Amino acid sequence: MRLDITSSGRRWLALAAVSACCTTGVAYADEPQADSNWKISVGPGMYVFPKYPGSSQLQVLPFPVQDISWKDCVFSQGPDVLGVNVLHGENYHLGMSVSFDFQSRSSSDDARLKGLPDVHYGPKLRLFGDYTVWAFTGAVAAYQDIAGTGQGLTATADIFMSAPIGNWLISMGPGLTWANATYTKTLFGITPQESAASGLPHYDTGSGMRDIHFNVNATYKISPHWSASGEAVVGRLEHYAAGSPITERRLDLNGVASVLYRF
């Protein structure tokens, strides 16, 4: 059985962290396939992610989860509000999407952040590609801020190994995230002016590795129409993200749990 990255969820940054990452819709070989170009699954979900990048506190956000696609071409899945597989085949996908990212920071999130500017969340343009050989899938993606939030450009690379075990589909594997200088300056840098306002030391940043991470995804088929899934991305902040005075903890934990009904 092949794990279809397009319909089984993406690593998200902060969801993204998600990247890198988030909803799971799985087709099982023994299921009757509907005579339709549409595949639609919806249900409730719960996201867990750091209060802000580098925070030691987690926050939980209830949020609806969707996995909608037309001819494996146009889709809306998890944080990907709208996407297109420009090229696709049995074992590969190349495409783009508008992806919503919850990654943000407010001076009210922590007393240490007083005097630092807020960083707002917003949509990002995602370019992606994946290729599957037997039980292994390689996936790459680039995320570009298109809302003027200062979150710049990040890129992820992941390798997944997946296997069906009874009614379970398990997928796991390592990955890494790279970030450009604009991203690290906004979320981890401290200018001299910000240092004077916050009391935190001045900290210059540049482009480099943001994190290394490990992905774990488990989906359970309850019935031909119902499935439940959980996904976790456990990362370790690196380089500029790890050394920033803003960072309280290098552990970067993101997760989502959902129940989906397939129409």
Image: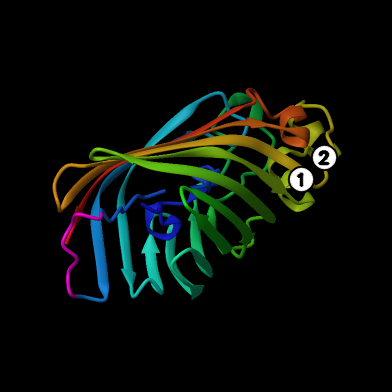
Q: In this view, does 65 lie to the left or right of 100?
A: left
Quadrant of the snapshot with the C terminus: bottom left
**Residue 205 appearing in the image:** yes
The disc labelled 2 sits on which kind of residue?
Answer: Gln
Which circle, 2 or 1, is nearer the viewer? Answer: 1
What is the CA distance from the residue labelled 2 to the residue labelled 1?
13 Å
**Which numbered tag is attached to residue 185?**
1
Which residues, given as a range, are shown in magenta? Answer: 29-35
Q: Say how many tags the image has.
A: 2
Q: Which residue is drawn at 30% across and 44% down?
A: 45
The disc labelled 1 sits on which kind of residue?
Answer: Lys
Q: Residues within 10 Å of mark 2 (few under 14, many from 20)?
A: few
- The location of residue 65, given as percent across then percent down, is 31, 52
**Foreground residue, 241 or 36?**
36
233 over 15 or under it: above or below: above
Query: What secondary structure is marked by label 2?
Result: helix
Residue under pointer 2: 193
Q: Is residue 77 magenta?
A: no
Q: Residue at x 76, y 45 (%)?
A: 185
**Which numbered tag is attached to residue 130?**
none
Query: What secondary structure is marked by label 1?
Result: helix
Q: Is residue 31 magenta?
A: yes
248 over 152 or under it: above or below: above
Q: Which residue is drawn at 29% across and 42% down?
A: 258
Q: Which residue is drawn at 79% across and 50% down?
A: 181
- The location of residue 137, given as percent across then percent down, is 52, 51
Dot 2 or dot 1, earlier in sequence = 1
Q: Residues within 10 Å of mark 1 (few under 14, many from 20)?
A: many
Q: Is residue 149 left or right of residue 48?
A: right
Q: Is residue 241 left or right of residue 7?
A: right
